Amino acid sequence: MSSLLEQQLTTDPLVADTQLDPDGYEPRLLTVTLDTEQYPDAVATARVDIRWFTTGDFSIHYVETREDNTHWECRWDRHPSTHNTRLHFHEPPAGTDISDLDLPSNHPLDVYSTVFEAIEHRIESLW
């Protein structure tokens, strides 16, 4: 699943780089470095960490690091949970408040589309 997402991400104008860890044969983490030229100067780095499991569960963690070394982050999760429904969202700016989430589809490309649309809205709000 990670390779499918990586192929899609390499064509996205927000993406500067992708890296599978540990490698392309047994990926556990897909780290996506975003192009900070599209952000205001106050944002030093931005990345998305993607984990997709054979069960269909996933974790997509968006993190901005500011020039002052503070973070703005949120996370889309699908996994068994005692605190919320299986599908839930860790709210920005710290990712500590959690709400139930409803997605039209759990297909990786649909989830990618939803997440990157939210990131685009975030970038627009920063300007």
Image (tube, rainbow, N blue to C red):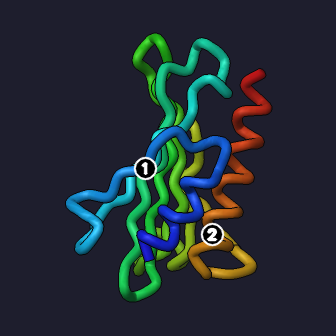
Q: Nearer the viewer, residue 12 or 60?
A: 12
Please tell me which residue is depicted at 55% across the width and 54% down the height of the picture. Answer: 10
Q: How crowded is mark 1: few (under 14 residues within 10 Å), some or many (20 or more)?
A: some
Q: Residues within 10 Å of mark 2 (few under 14, many from 20)?
A: some
Please tell me which residue is depicted at 70% across the width and 62% down the height of the picture. Answer: 114
Residue 58 lies, in percent from the top left, at: 45, 72
Please tell me which residue is depicted at 35% across the width and 51% down the height of the picture. Answer: 19
Quadrant in the picture for the C terminus = top right
Q: Callout 1, which amino acid?
A: Thr
The residue under label 1 is: 18
The answer to whether the residues at label 1 and label 2 have Cβ atoms under 8 Å apart is no
Q: Is residue 13 left or right of residue 2?
A: right
Q: Nearer the viewer, residue 75 or 85?
A: 75
Q: What is the spatial separation of the Cα atoms under label 1 and label 2, in whole angstroms?
A: 17 Å
Please tell me which residue is depicted at 21% across the width and 60% down the height of the picture. Answer: 22
Image quarter for residue 39? top right
Badge nearest the viewer, 1 or 2: 1
